[in-house]
């Protein structure tokens, strides 16, 4: 029976669906039916008791897909079964089944084990998306955290050395010595991983090099005396 107002019926009665029986779908050569026929289809639900075991619910859902998922006269392949127009509450198992399409785990593992793994995957996959990039940047964070403990003092030491090379007046040498002692004391309290010991030792060596420059700047006479002794020793060796 052709309903010319089929769409209007579906708006007034939500349990009905508007479907079309296409022209020639029954017999193409004889063109049966001779034209599209607008039909009304009621909703059919698969209802079970709440006490039914979830494993049996899964088997029923799988069987319904095998039976009803193919194409028919009034529906395309894959349209049924579906969760549309359900008046009764939908079970958690049915929601997961229709969302993921079922899992191969249920075909090879006990139901409880397959359910446990399936639920764990839903949790672990999003976590993996977040954790894997973090694992990639962890070495950088580890290195940056250790180096940040002494890089500041490299900068301070460079400032002291820069002031020395620019010709700092001798009366300000005492202030530079105090700053250098403060840097050395701070570096001595630094605690880093063993892998960064060599960089800390290198910083301490640089501190000593700057200290030597300060000593020569503060006692230029001793420097000249050392140079004179060195030249005298060289002269004696030549005479011998």
Image: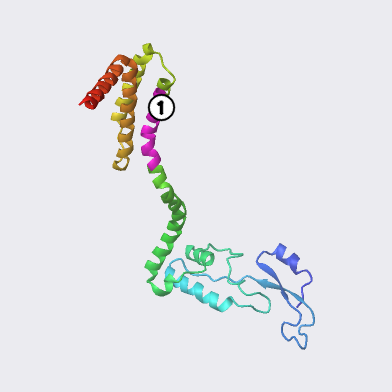
Q: Is residue 89 left or right of residue 184?
A: right
Q: Position of residue 126 (x, y in %)?
A: 47, 55
Closer to the camera, 29 or 47? 29
Query: Where's the C terminus, which quadrant?
Result: top left
Q: Position of residue 203 (x, y in %)?
A: 33, 32
Q: Is residue 160 magenta?
A: yes
Residue at the location (58% across, 65% down)? 83
Q: Is residue 140 magenta?
A: no
Res. 52 visible in picture = no
- Furthest-top residue in this view: 171
User: Which element is circle 1 on?
Assistant: helix
Q: Is residue 228 left or right of residue 113?
A: left
Q: Is residue 164 left or right of residue 61?
A: left
Query: Where's the N terminus, which quadrant?
Result: bottom right
Q: Position of residue 207 (x, y in %)?
A: 33, 27
State the predominant SS element of the stretch in magenta: helix
Q: Which residue is mark 1?
A: 158
Is 77 located above or below residue 31 in the figure?
above
Res. 109 visible in picture = yes
Residue at the location (34% across, 20% down)? 214
- Furthest-left residue in this view: 240
């Amino acid at each position: 029976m052709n309903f010319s107002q089929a769409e209007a019926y579906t708006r007034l009665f939500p349990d009905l669906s508007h479907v079309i029986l296409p022209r020639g779908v029954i017999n193409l050569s004889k063109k049966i039916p001779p034209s599209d026929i607008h039909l009304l289809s009621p909703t059919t639900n698969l209802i079970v008791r709440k006490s039914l075991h979830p494993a049996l619910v899964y088997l029923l859902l799988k069987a319904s897909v095998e039976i009803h998922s193919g194409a028919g006269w009034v529906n395309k392949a894959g349209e049924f079964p579906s969760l549309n127009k359900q008046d009764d509450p939908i079970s958690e198992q049915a929601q997961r089944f229709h969302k993921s399409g079922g899992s191969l785990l249920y075909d090879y593992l006990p139901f409880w084990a397959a359910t446990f793994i399936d639920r764990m995957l839903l949790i672990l996959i999003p976590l993996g998306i977040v954790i894997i990039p973090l694992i990639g940047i962890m070495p950088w964070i580890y290195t940056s955290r250790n180096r940040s403990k002494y890089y500041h003092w490299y900068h301070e030491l460079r400032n002291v050395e820069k002031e020395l090379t620019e010709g700092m007046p001798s009366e300000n040498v005492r202030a530079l010595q105090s700053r250098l002692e403060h840097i050395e004391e701070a570096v001595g309290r630094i605690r880093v991983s063993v892998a960064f010991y060599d960089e800390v030792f290198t910083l301490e060596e640089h501190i000593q090099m700057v200290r030597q420059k300060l000593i020569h700047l503060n006692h230029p006479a001793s420097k000249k005396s050392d140079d004179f002794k060195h030249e005298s020793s060289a002269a004696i060796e030549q005479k011998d």
